[in-house]
Amino acid sequence: MSANNSSSNSSVTLERNGPTYRISFTRAQADILIRKYLNETIISFECINTGYNNLIFFINTQENTQQYVIKIGGRYWNKIKTEAEVKALELLSKHTTIPVPKILAYSSDRNNEFGVEWILMTRLSGQNMSIVCKTQKLSLNAKKSIIRDLADYISQMHFKIPRFDKIGALMINGQIGTDLNQLGPWSTYEQFIQTRVQAEKKILNEDITFSSVKDSMLDAIDRFEKIQLPIFSNLPFVFSHGDLDFQNILISINDLELPRITGIVDWEWAGSFPCSEEYFTSYNYFLDDDKEIRIYFLNELEKRNILTPRTIEHFSLLEKINQFVTNLAPWDLTDLVNPDYLIVNKRLEQSSSIVLSALNELDICTKKE
């Protein structure tokens, strides 16, 4: 759930009661937390407007030049997201050289003195790449420099961190559990898809937002379940960030012709997932930027033996399956503050079109197999 929180036309913006709705954390609470766990005194407390699923605060203290981050978890998840990030950072620090924050303290129990889940961690150097890209245009050489670093780090995620035989999010005990939507864990890709389709079916039946497309979407699900898909036996499960795009990459800006990655953050979606999923949840900046950058990115991954859309077996089918599942009941049309039904219905028509197109292509492709 890493997309923007609104959809708009020229006059109306759809707003959601998103993950941070009614979640708060004050300077006074931060003072108590920092004093309790670091025995330090805050001299600056800054709320950063870059998080959608969380509240993010940058902290400076009187006693230390090290800067800190306090991350306050959103309301949709109980324990799972906080513990997935904590465990991911532990594995990354143990098995890789990827620059990641260090966990200093955390609580995944909202029944604490602050009433929220929180993580206290070190702040990494560098600038958020998404912010840099808003203020200046990165050259081709600069993008390639970042890609080389990123490909090295993806390789470490895939090959340095021990693999799991299940799909799902990381649990604090080091095992694989449910994903953040409390589905799973799964032993096969087929189970992974079937469960998600059933979850979308439940939303269609219960949420009136989707009433205008409910019947057609349920018919599409019936059709989908009758398609004879191949067995995806050559689809390894790899350690995945889950939302690795430029908004979660920090870069140095001392030399903008040769920037380096100084940090990768926001590991709350991390877990063990089919390698194809990364190309649906991550890397949009590098895959959609332009043809030359896309080819360079895929080439650098393949040099490191990382499977890509060009080498993953049945990738076109996997892509259509993802389009089908994620458009049945789009998550960003739930919990709307001011549903403008003209906009909602337009969005639903778009989703229906994508679902039917993906379904027709799956029909054609599987008959050719």
Image: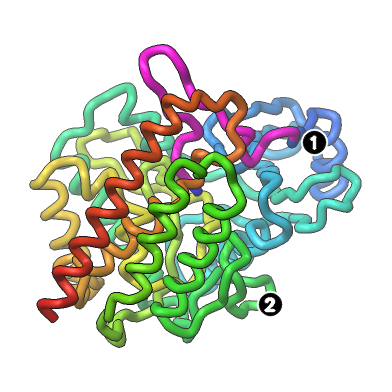
The quadrant holding residue 220 is bottom left
C-alpha gap between disc 2 and disc 1: 28 Å
Question: Secondary structure of the magenta portion, mostly?
Answer: loop
Q: Judging from the image, what secondary structure is the residue with disc 2 in?
A: loop
The spot of residue 276 in percent (x, y) is 31, 68
- Asked whether, in this view, residue 68 is left or right of residue 111, the answer is left
Q: Amino acid at mark 2?
A: Asn
Say which label, 2 or 1, has the lower sequence index.
1
Q: Residue at x 36, y 53 (%)?
A: 282
Q: Judging from the image, what secondary structure is the residue with disc 1 in?
A: helix
Q: Quick check: marks 2 and 1 in contact, CB under 8 Å?
A: no
In front: 313, or 275?
A: 313
In front: 113, or 223?
A: 223
In front: 305, or 54?
A: 54
- Asked whether, in this view, residue 107 is left or right of residue 137, the answer is right
| Residue under numbered circle 1 | 30
- Asked whether, in this view, residue 94 is left or right of residue 138, the answer is right
